[in-house]
Amino acid sequence: MEALLREAEAALDRLDIARGRDLWAQIYDVERSTVGICQLGQLDRRLGRWVDAAEELTRCVQEMRPPATTTEQRLHDTRHADLAAARREVAQLRVFAPAGAAPVLVDGRLVDESGQIYVAPGQHEVAAALPDGRKARSTVHVTAGESRAVLLSPEPAALRKGAPPQARPAGAPARPAAPPAPWLLYAGSAASGAFLVSGIVLHIVASVEDSALRDEMCKPHSDIEDAGAFRREQHAVELKQHLSTAALVAGTALGAATLVVAVLPSGAQVRASAGGAEVRFSW
């Protein structure tokens, strides 16, 4: 151990950083100390091995004890500055995998239980194995200094092998799809009608009140003495107009949705997929 330390110091004195780094790696394998991981991080930073440097300096900063002297404070600040410099050259991924998924890999590198890993700028493959044998995969592209969350979604379950479907005799009529539940159509229609009626009523009331206010403004001797009261009445009319528009839009949208549910065949699906996450809507 002492011989390794002396040889590592001699290599750094002659500015042989690569040799010094190899020797400190051997020292760290013998004794996993905070000094060792900090030295590795600082040397990898000087060698431009930014991903290794970011990982090692993160552990270095986490393991360092709070500074008690001026010298320790300077060293503490230096290590934080080294870490900040390294993180500017890499990207950080936070992987969210399904429960029980193991191992979780980024380009073949194992992600620890924290779910965080440093990567070089560029495109990376994220994958995880589920207990049932399925895979969860995603591809992500990152730039230097970026931090990105990656949500892994499992592959669709394979269709289970079973008895083949019964053959339908030639010319036999196809079985019609089951229609949507009647209560759903009734409820959608009733709600749509309620919104539309409310919107029409509010629109009529707002129009009448707006006309009354305009007539009052045009009188040569207006009885409205309080400008503040007039503005409040005007704002109330505008609010009713906005509510009327919103109710009409909601009623129209709800009516259209009810019509779509009534027309679409049973089992129709709308699927959207983005960034490894998938959302399904089914009727």
Image: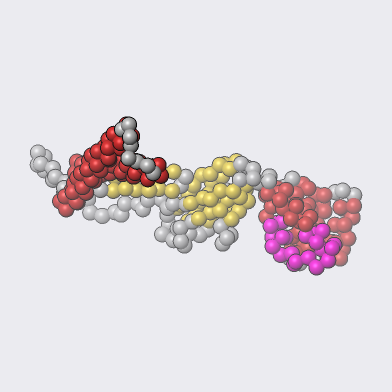
- Taking the view exactly as shown, the residue that stands out farthest to the front is 221
Can residue 256 be seen in the rendering of this structure?
no
Q: Quadrant of residue 243?
A: top left
The magenta segment is: 56-76
37 lies left or right of 259 = right
Count of numbered badges drawn on the protein? 0
Q: In which quarter of the image is the N terminus?
A: bottom right
Residue depicted at x 31% and y 51%:
159
Residue depicted at x 72% and y 53%:
83
113 lies left or right of 240 = right
Display colour scheme: secondary structure
- Taking the view exactly as shown, the residue that stands out farthest to the left is 172
Residue depicted at x 25% and y 48%:
283
Q: Is the magenta stretch mostly helix, strand or loop?
A: helix
Instruction: Report if residue 145 lies within the magenta region.
Output: no
Residue depicted at x 35% and y 52%:
158
| Residue 14 on image: x %, y % | 90, 49
| Residue 267 on image: x %, y % | 24, 47
152 lies left or right of 244 = right
Looking at the image, which is closer to me, 90 or 69?
Answer: 69
| Residue 87 on image: x %, y % | 68, 49
Instruction: Report if residue 69 lies within the magenta region.
Output: yes
Q: In this view, does 159 lie above or below 114?
A: above
262 lies left or right of 115 = left
Looking at the image, which is closer to me, 189 or 162?
Answer: 189
| Residue 32 on image: x %, y % | 74, 65
